[in-house]
Image (spheres, coloured by chain):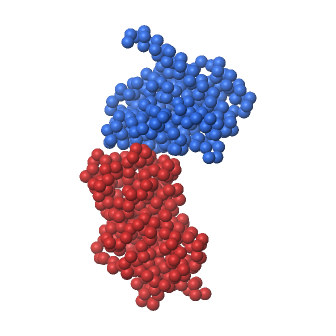
Chain colours: A blue, B red
Amino acid sequence: MSGLLMAEEIESKIVALKQEAKEVRKDDLTMIAKALSGHPGGSLSLVEILVSLFYGGVLRHDPKNPSFPDRDRLILSKGHGCPALYVMLAHRGYFPREALWTLRKLGSPLQGHPHRGLPGIESSSGSLGQGLSIATGIALAARLDQKSYRTYCILGDGEMDEGQIWESAMTAAHYSVDSLCAILDANGVQQNGPVKTIKNLEPIPDKWRSFGWHTIEVNGHRFAELLTAFEEAKNTKGKPTMIVARTVKGKGVSFMEGQSVWHGKAPNPEQLEQALKEIEAGDIGS
Amino acid sequence: MGGVSTVQSDKKATRDGFGEGLVELGRTRPEVVVLSGDLGDSTRAIWFQKEFPNRFFEVGIAEQDMIGMAAGFALSGKIPFACSFGVFVTGRAWEQIRTSVCNMNLNVKIGGSHCGISVGADGTTNEAMEDISIMRSQVHMTVLVPSDAIEAKRATLAAADISGPVYIRLGRNPAPIVTKKEDPFTVGKANLIRQGKDVSLFACGLMVYEAIQASELLAKEGIQARVVNMHTVKPVDREAIISACRDTGAIVTAEEHTVVGGFGSAVAEVVVEEFPVPMARIGIQDRIGESGEPDELFRAFHLTASDIAQAARSVIRKKKK
């Protein structure tokens, strides 16, 4: 394939991914608005990461057979971002889209934070700091069984305050778990303010590099950068990979972007209408 | 169910029975893996490591990460045994056990050694005395407290057969053998050691030996004490407790553990709900541990056979009022 053709193919792929990202953002906010609670900021920052995984050909998965043994595993360690993951799973056919409107309701499998049992959810999560250890265990089990599946784990930057993150960072590097790829949704804002103010974590890439991880820094809203990084991770041997995805909390909605107040608050009907208009008119992804 | 147990003179630590159990599981159950928080020599996890190095994972001094990894192994079809001192693995990683293990009812087994004040010289930081309370509050968790090395091995093997999380409480010091290989061991089913009609002594762990000794002291006074080995604290054997209330009318519990929420509390919950009778709980009375020789500590903390016998006399008196 010539370079020109490849570029054209990526370009047409990105057009489709951008359209899907738009649909994810709209359903994400609509479901949170219907639930009257949830986490818009940290789910909107995740959208391009999730769309890359599920629509960009990164994840080996089968919505019709969600637990086939050789599937890639995805753990959403920053579990409060789950509305975006639920939308993604529904759009890919893991369960009907109508289920999205039951978010946070009594008896719904769409719990406020992910709970195992919903098709496509590998592990419960949402108590921050725990997902990377679980992912490491899964990846080591794959090695023991000589399985080829890869394990992905999405973390938040505020989550890195937790000591367990650094325990697992050391363990995964010690065991050279190269089938493990972590993605940091570095949106720069946590519940009570900017990460820099709560507790400065920079230089984040240097920290992971010094802990023995192959570290790639990308703009987490650009599909071309994300897809290239996932490919690089697949080709990295002897080390786990950390993709530091620089994102914007509340991405795509002007009044939510970068605002910690939108960490865990549902939009009212007027705010939702305004947000959906902005998302429709927006152009995120390239 | 034998009659009066003949206590043998040889001693062996329950952690040794655990280590033997792990090795046997290694041979018979290829899905068993062992994770260790840098104390494998103390917990005997290294006995497994020597024979099955590929299925042994050293995590370092990182109990929270160890429990999370164990959850990952369980999600992948393995039966992980996560091993450390009881105080660290149940205490520091309590919320990991809750959220990453018990909330999903995952098949994770936890071996906690150096429990109780029989740890001795190392003192309070290393002496788990709340582990039963905090593990039995976890949904789906089975809590096993073997009384000797024989029972510890059987508890370890039984844990692998249970689908779901299990905590096994283990001790450091060599302890008298109080069970026999031919005794039954069914999770959730207490073992009657000695029949009696005047009072019932329920014990777990090393206190089973003390309870047997207490029953002999009481027998000299003409008091017939029932002795029950409660190797499973959760699910607790309600029938054994109710029948003891009905038949003997007075209960004493004995644990090498805090009385706040522990084994005695588990028994008391059933007594109060089903058949209230006078009751006393022998155990650590809401205080921290300290250094010393194990037998000195047992005396200082009022965990001896004579303390149990005294409590028995007291509840019998209340019964006769």
Q: Is residue A127 left or right of residue B81?
A: right
Please, is residue B135 above or below residue A58 in the view?
A: below
Q: Quadrant of residue B167?
A: bottom left
Please, is residue B84 above or below residue B118 in the view?
A: above
Q: Residue at x 49, y 79 (%)?
A: B200
Please, is residue A252 above or below residue B154 in the view?
A: above
Q: Quadrant of the N terminus of chain B?
A: bottom left
Q: Residue at x 31, y 70 (%)?
A: B181
Q: Quadrant of the C terminus of chain B?
A: bottom right
Whether residue B69 appears in this view of the structure is no
Q: Is residue B265 left or right of residue B21?
A: right
| Residue placed furthest toward the front | A64
| Residue placed furthest toward the right | A270
Image coords of residue B188 (percent x, y) = 45, 66
Image coords of residue B170 (percent x, y) = 39, 63
Q: Nearer the viewer, residue A65 or B20?
A: A65
Image coords of residue B182 (percent x, y) = 32, 72
Whether residue B242 appears in this view of the structure is yes
Q: Nearer the viewer, residue B116 or A119?
A: A119
Q: Residue at x 64, y 40 (%)?
A: A102
* Total numbered labels: 0
Please, is residue A248 above or below residue B6 in the view?
A: above
Q: Residue at x 48, y 52 (%)?
A: B105
